[in-house]
Image (tube, rainbow, N blue to C red):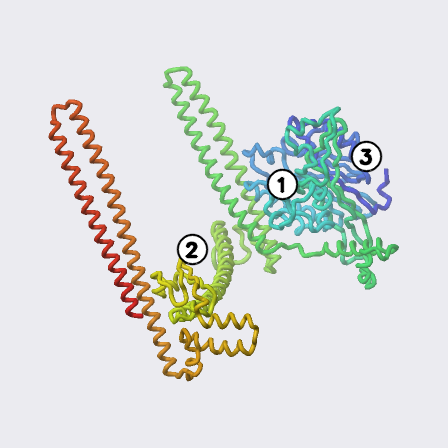
Amino acid sequence: MDSPSLEVNEINVITLNCWGLKFISTLRNERLTEIGQAIGSASPTPHIVGLQECWTQEDYKSIRKETKHILPYGKFYHSGIFGGGLAILSKWPIEESSMFRYPLNGRPTAFFRGDWFVGKGVAGARIRYGQGPKDIVELHAPYETEPNDSYICHRTAQAWEIAKLMRGAAERGHLVLGLGDFNMIPLSLAHRLISTHSPARDVWMILHPDCSIGAAIDEVEKARRRPIPTAEFNLSENGATCDSVLNTWRWNKGEQKRLGPNRPEIEIPGDTPDPRAKRLDYIFANTCFDENNPSAGGWIVKDARVGMLQRHSKYQCSLSDHFSVEATLVHTKYASPTEQTIKNKSAVSNGVYLQTAPSESHLLSAHTQLKSSSSPPYLPISTYDEIIAMIHTYRLRERRQRRLRLGHFVASVFISIGCFIAVWWSPRNFVAFILMLLSSLGLGAGVIDGLIGGLFVGSEIRALKEFEWEISNARAAANGEPLDLAEEGIQDCPRSSPPLTDLERLLAIEIRLMMEKEAEAEEIREREERKKREESEMERARMEAESRSMMEWRLRVEMEYRHGNTIGGNIDPVNIDYASRERCPQAGNGRPGQGESDVWQEGGKTRYQEMARDKNPVSCRREENRRLGSADFSSIENSQEAGEESRGWGRGKESALKRPETEEQRKKRLRDNERRRLKYQRIRERENKRNIEWRQRDKSRKAKLKLGEEQQEAEIMEEDNLLVRVISGSKRFRKDEANNRFQQKTKERRKAQTKMEEEEDNNEDESEEERRGYWQEEEDDE
C-alpha cells in the first residue's frame, strides 16, 4: 500500500450500479461477491470506487473482503428509512464524509418510487492522497432513479444541488470527482446544469465529444440521422452502460433460461445491432487548473472506458444490469504549445514524427483540457426561463394538492363523527362493525393526508421558492442584470408597483414564449408563401408559353387543313386531337378532306390517313427529288411546291408571281381569322349544349323505360295472383270478370308502350333534323 506522502500523478476511478435490491434482485449475493473479486483483480488497479444500489451491510462487507488488499478504506452510507445504497472504497484515508439529502426528494405518497423513503442524496467524502494542503479528492456519489415527468422539477433541483456541491469543492482548490448512476442522457437539462454550473466535466465527452446523446430509438438521437450502432461501437464510442444486448439481464426470459451452471456459453457478436443501449452512468472531474498559477498544472483525462463486461464464472450471467465506467486521470504541467508543435500537429497525427509524437499530442490534449475548464458557467437565457416556468407550474400544482389534502382531512373527520353517531342506532352488530371499520380507515387516511398537506407540502413549496430564487439569480448574472437580493415580503428599496404573483409571472413567461413561437411560425409561413408564389408564377408563365405555342400550332394546322394544304401534301399522316376535330366540321362529320380517303377510330381519337398521296403532284415531285438527290432541282421544285401548296392543286406558278401581302390585306386576314375563331367557338358551345341535352334526354328515357318495366312486372304478378285465386275457387270473384280485367290491363299496357315508342321515334327524328340543320348551317358558312 502506497503512503500518502508519495507524490501521486495518476488516479484510477470506477463507478458501478450493483443492482443489489434485497428480496428483488436475482442472484444478489453471488453477483456482488463476484463484483468484489472483479474489482480486486482489475487492471489498472483502481484507487477510488463508487458503488450504487448496494443496499445491505452483508453485500458491502463481502465486497470489502475481496478488495481490502488494494482498497483498505471504505464508507457505507446510512440515510432515509431503508438506506441510500451508496458506498465508497478508497486506497487513501477518508478524512471526512457527509450525506447530503436533497431538499426536493419526492413525496411520501409516492411509495412506489421510494425516493422519500430511501433518503436520496449525495454521498460526499474528502480523501487525502498527498501531504500538500490541496492534495485532496472531494468525492460526490449520487444515485438517481429513472426520470419521470411528474418529478421533473425535483430532478432538475437535484442536478442543481449536485452542481453547487462540486462548485464549492472546486473553489477550495481540491480535485472534484462526481460519479454514479445519474439516470440522465447526455446533453439533457440535468446534464447541462451540472456541466455548466460546476467546474467538473463529463470525462467521456472530453474524449468522445461526438458520442450519442441517447438510445438509437430515442427521438433526440433519431434527429441526428445516424445508423443504428453495433454493440461494440456502443461500448467503445458511445459509452453505453445500460440496456445493452451484451447484458444478459436485458434478455427475455427464454434466453435467460439458457444460462446456468454446466451449460454452453452464449456469445453475442460485437457487430450485433444495439438500438436500445444508452449511457446513464457518469464520471465528472475538474482539472484543478489555476489561471493565476499555470505552472502548477492540473488533472486531465487520460483514458475512459466501459468495464465489468465479464460474466459470472458459474451462472454465466452479467454481474449487474449496468456496466461500469472507468477513467484514468493524470496530473500534468501546463505549457503553451509552441509554433513548431502547432505546425507539426498533422504530422504527429499521421505518425511522421515517431519519436516526438506522444509528447506533442499529450501537450496539445493537456492544453485543450486545461483551457476548456475556464469557460463561462452560464446557460442560454431561454433555459433559465424554461426552468422558472416549470417551477411555477409545479408550485401551482402543489398548492392545489395541499387544498385537496386538507379538504380530505376535514371531510374524513366529519364522516368519522357521523359513523360514530350511527353506531348507536345500528340494528345489527355487523353493521356497527362495518361503520367502525370504515370510520377508522377513513380517519386514518384523512389524518395522513392532512399531515402531508399541512406540513410536507408547505416545506416543499418553500424549497421550490429557494430553488426559484437561485435560478433567477443565475439568469440575472447570465444576462448581465443586477442581482435581485430582495426576498419575498422584504424589499430593500421601494417599488413603483406591487410584485407579481406566481400566476402572473407564469402567464407572462408563457405569453412571451408564445409570442416568440408565433413570430418564428409567421416568418416560416411568409417564407413558404413567398416560395409558393414564385413557383406559381413560374408555372403560370410556363403554362402560358405552352398554351400560346399549342394554340398557334393548332390554328396553323387547322387553317392549313381547311385550305387543303396539311393533309394534301405537306406532312405525313396526321393525328388531330378532339379540339381540332371540333374546329373542322368536315372532319367531325366523318367526311374526308382534300387528299385523304379514310377515317377510322382508334383509342378514342379520330385519325386521318392519306390514301391519295401519289395523286398529289407536289408529293410526286418531292419523292422524285429525294430519289434523284439533285440539290438544284430540289430547291427549284421546293419553291414551286411552296407556291402550289399555298393555293392547292397545280397553282404554284401563279402564287410564285404573287405580290407581297399589304398591310390592309394582313389586317383583313387577321380579322377573318378572328371571325372564324369566334364562329368556331360559338359552334363548339352549341354542340356541347346539344350534347348535354341529348344525354339528359337519353337518361330520362332510360329511367322511364326502367320504371315502366317495373310497373309492368308488378301488374303482371298482381293479375297472376288474381287468376290463381279465381282458379283455386274463391267465391268473391268470377272467372270471366278476372279474364276481362286482365285483357283490359294488357291492352292499356300495350297502348302506353306504343305511345312511348312513338314519342321516342319523334324525339330521334327531331334530333336527326337538328343535326342535319346544324351541319347544313356549317356547310353554308363554308
Residue 237 placement, left or right of 356: left
- Image position, residue 744 (x, y; %): 14, 37
Which amino acid type corresponds to the residue marked 2 in the rendered image?
Glu
Label 2 close to label 1 by CB (< 8 Å)? no
3 vs 2, front mark: 2
Which amino acid type is marked by label 3? Ser
In the image, 45 versus 278, the foreground residue is 278
Could you tell me if residue 377 is visible in this image? yes
Residue 41, disc: 3
The residue tagged with tag 1: helix, strand or loop? loop
Q: Is residue 742 shown left or right of residue 67?
A: left
Labels 3 and 2: the sequence-earlier one: 3
760 left or right, relative to 222 = left
Residue neighbourhood size for the residue with mark 1, other residues' Cα within 10 Å, grouped as few (<14), some (14–19), many (≥20): many
Find residue 264 and report its horizontal and vertical position in percent: 74, 27
In the foreground, 506 or 433: 506
Point 59% across, 55% down: residue: 475
Residue that appears at 47% across and 49% down: 503
Tag shown at residue 602: 2
Question: Are the residues flagged by discs 3 and 2 in contact, CB closer than 8 Å?
Answer: no
Q: Is residue 36 above or below residue 512?
A: above
Label at residue 102: 1
User: Within 10 Å of the Cα at label 3, are there few (<14), some (14-19), or many (20+) other Cα atoms?
Assistant: some
